[in-house]
Amino acid sequence: MSGPLQPATNREKLSEEFLLTGDLLNASEAERIGLVNRVVPSGQAYAAGLALAKRLAAGPTRAIRWTKLALNKRRSYWIPGSYAPPWSEKRTPD
């Protein structure tokens, strides 16, 4: 599979591996493999988050709102070949 969704799919697979194995990784490794957007020095996470929030608040709010909606909607779709679709599980009533 290739295309614009490939990096997200790879991150999801890496996330699954770390969740299932319990292996630990440091912040720089998480940034290198794309599990986090950025790493900031210790004690500066709040300031960095606030700076990003202010930047977004000062931006075109309608465009940001619709972009966020589209991104969240895209994530809710099943990607063929990535894993079994949610509706494929056969369950019997309890």
Image: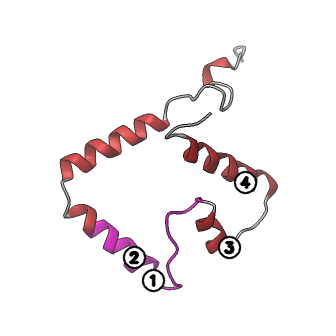
Q: Which residue is mark 2?
A: 48
Q: Which range of residues does the magenta coloring cover?
A: 34-54
Which numbered disc, 3 or 4, marks the residue that appears first in the sequence? 4
Q: Residue at x 44, y 35 (%)?
A: 74
Q: Secondary structure at mark 4?
A: helix
In 3D space, how far apart are the residues under numbered discs 1 and 2 (Cα atoms)? 6 Å
Image position of 84 with respect to 70: above or below: above
Q: Are marks 1 and 2 in contact (CB under 8 Å)?
A: yes
Pinpoint residue 81: horizontal percent, then vertical percent: 66, 27
Pinpoint residue 59: horizontal percent, then vertical percent: 20, 60
Query: Which label belongs to residue 26?
Result: 3
Left or right of 47 on screen, residue 94: right
In 3D space, how far apart are the residues under numbered discs 3 and 4 (Cα atoms)? 14 Å
Q: Secondary structure at mark 2?
A: helix
Left or right of 94 on screen, residue 21: right
In 3D space, how far apart are the residues under numbered discs 4 and 2 (Cα atoms)? 26 Å
In 3D space, how far apart are the residues under numbered discs 1 and 3 (Cα atoms)? 17 Å
In 3D space, how far apart are the residues under numbered discs 3 and 2 (Cα atoms)? 19 Å
Which numbered disc, 4 or 2, marks the residue that appears first in the sequence? 4
Q: Locate the C terminus by quadrant.
A: top right
Q: Secondary structure at mark 1?
A: loop
Q: Which residue is mark 4?
A: 19
Pinpoint residue 91: horizontal percent, then vertical percent: 71, 17
Camera-near label (3 vs 4) is 3
The amino acid pointed to by label 4 is Leu
In the image, 93 versus 11, the foreground residue is 11
Query: Which label belongs to residue 44?
Result: 1
Q: Quadrant of residue 9?
A: top right
